[in-house]
Amino acid sequence: MRTAKLTLDPGFTVGPVPRRLFGSFVEHMGRCVYTGIFEPEHPSADENGFRTDVLELTKELGPTVVRYPGGNFVSGFEWEDSVGPREERPRRLDRAWRSTETNQFGLAEFDAWARAVDTEPMMAVNLGTRGLQDACNLLEYSNIASGSKYSDLRVAHGSKDPFGIKLWCLGNELDGPWQTGHKTAAEYGRLAHETGMAMRSIDPDIELVAVGSSSRSMPTFGAWESTVLELSYDAVDYVSLHAYYEEKDGDVASFLGSAVDMDLFIEQVVATADAVRARGKHSKKINLSFDEWNVWYQSRPHHAPGVQPWDVAPRVIEDEYSITDAVVVGTLLNSLLRHSDRVTIGAQAQLVNVIGLLRSEPGGDAWKQTIAHPFEQVRRLATGEVLRVAATSDKYESDKYGDVDVVDASATWDEETSTVSLFLANRDLADSAKVDVSLRGFDVSKVVTAKVLAATEGQDRHTTNLEGAHDAVGLRPLQDVTVADGVATVVLPPLSWAVVQVAKA
Ligand code: AHR
């Protein structure tokens, strides 16, 4: 049996849980939009063409913000194509994913869908092939009530009320050579500044996200953030981070330690942003928007067999997630929570089919992938204040990250309901882990929730939720939880993710 000890104290907090931390992402990519959230021919479709089966599952997950419309897609997107009468909208070649965009789902449809699932939209502008003027036109179309060219155009298109979008991304992954309109940090920093300032003059209430590094392993990582923020500090509120993890060459030990990389990535971006703040004598702090993160098997072919260039809604990166992947996603959520004083926006990528929390088949079923479970539980149960977790855990060795804690944890304290919530992962493939949690400063002694995601009989760490076996992997009751003398003791099965809540008796 492996062991870990956690100490929590109500006076020892990171800060309030930022609700925007539990976002997701809908890109015009593969089948995320078409046959994902939108499929007018589907038996469950409503009058807007939205799949209500996917809509209901999305509501259960409850992403608090949804980033749209890309991703790499946005760097070639001409937003005017996606508004107005549907029959007049052009079909366009999407160079990013070499598919055909029909524009049958566009800005008004996204606004209506976001309202239907009760999420906050986070819109990205195209700073790849376009620039300041188009970003301003889109903002005017979206947020100005009426009385100007683009606001009146929106009204003429049937959307009387403005969309009122507060969160805007100034482009996407422009540090990446794969990005249409790839730029140097100096080119991008200047453009972000000019565009941000111009957008703010139209709507001073918006919040702006500058493009950060596409991963910690980018050769420009660090220098990119530094230069971009030097040039755009006053114009922006956040800098973005993107990270995808996968099990490569059978190295499951490193894969399970992915949150070590995420922790480091966040801490290094915070250090860089704060150094720019100090050098520039700025009073405001730049916060972090981790607006693409997930497990993604990037080393596998991106397109499914048979997909042809310029297909409509092809099968692209439809990764099927296992129990191992769900445990890693649980630890990535822990990393975000641990750093939630500075990471105040998060967007898991993506919502459906494309490295999705959800899967849906054209004309068929929709279901939750394994990774949806930790996402949903943390979104629901992480409330109140994030607690600092003083942890000592047994370790294991990994090639990429050296010694890694066997038990990974985050915790929240909700004073209103007198509830401590613990989010725990056991990274050991073979052994259970006994976790002692000192809760002495809290008046809590009753276990109100104890659920675990782990392999059950007949399953192994590779088990996934498939069509015909939607609920093979899910949450089961966790029996081994006790509380005595201010200490909660939890026994986690091998390779598992769990949520435990202890409340006032
Ligand atoms: O989420 C899939 C892709 O990953 C996005 O389009 C891009 O921004 C990132 O590289």
Image (tube, grey):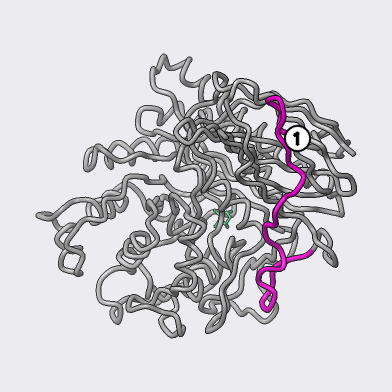
Amino acid carrying label 1: it is: Thr
135 and 477: which is toward the camera: 477
The residue furthest front is 505
- The magenta stretch spans residue 478: yes
Is the residue 267 above or below the residue 201 in the image?
above
Residue 480: quarter of image:
top right
Write down the quadrant of residue 76 in the picture. bottom left
User: Is 464 on the left-hand or right-hand side of 40?
Assistant: right
Q: Nearer the viewer, residue 23 or 180?
A: 23
What secondary structure is the magenta-colored segment mainly? loop
Q: Position of residue 133 (x, y in %)?
A: 28, 50
* Residue position marked by numbered label 1 in the rendering: 489
Image quarter where ligand 1 lies: bottom right
Q: Which residues are magenta?
A: 463-489
- Count the numbered circles shown: 1
Q: Is residue 494 visible?
A: yes
Up the image or down, 93 lies above or below 497; here it is below
Q: Secondary structure at mark 1?
A: strand
